[in-house]
Image: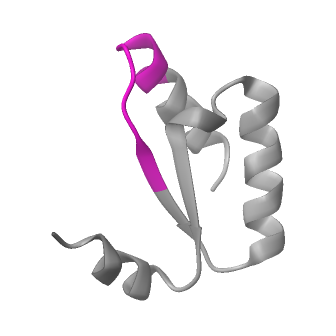
Amino acid sequence: MGISTIYLAAALHDMGGGKLIGTELEASKAARARANLEAAGLADLVDIRVGDARGNARRCRP
């Protein structure tokens, strides 16, 4: 989760909302990403899931 997440969340904001779901294996990196999103005023648009992307993807299935 990096600067591209902020750009994608900003685009969602500009388009009227939505939800961006991202995954990060390391909890410390996820915490930094959340802090950056808070600072940008975009945290409400992003759901950062900590853990292996494969496991997180399985939990997203309908």
Q: Residue furthest left?
A: 62
* 15 within the magenta span: yes
In this picture, residue 47 sits left or right of residue 54: right
Instruction: Give the vertical position of 60 relative to 14 (above or below).
Output: below
Residue 38: image x %, image y %?
Answer: 77, 34
* 59 within the magenta span: no
Residue 44: image quadrant is top right
Kindly identify the residue that appears in the image at 47 percent across and 19 percent down. Answer: 13
Kindly identify the residue that appears in the image at 71 percent across and 23 percent down. Answer: 41
Instruction: Give the vertical position of 6 relative to 55 (above or below).
Output: above
The N terminus sits in image quarter: bottom right
Kindly identify the residue that appears in the image at 73 percent across and 78 percent down. Answer: 26
In this picture, residue 38 sits left or right of residue 8: right
Instruction: Give the vertical position of 46 relative to 52 (above or below).
Output: above
- The number of callouts visible is 0
Residue 9: image x %, image y %?
Answer: 51, 32
In this picture, residue 32 sits left or right of residue 30: right
Residue 36: image x %, image y %?
Answer: 79, 40
Residue 58: image x %, image y %?
Answer: 29, 83
Kindly identify the residue that appears in the image at 41 percent across and 25 percent down. Answer: 12
The region drawn magenta spans 11-21
The C terminus sits in image quarter: bottom left
> Which color scheme is applied?
one colour
Q: Nearer the viewer, residue 17 or 14?
A: 17
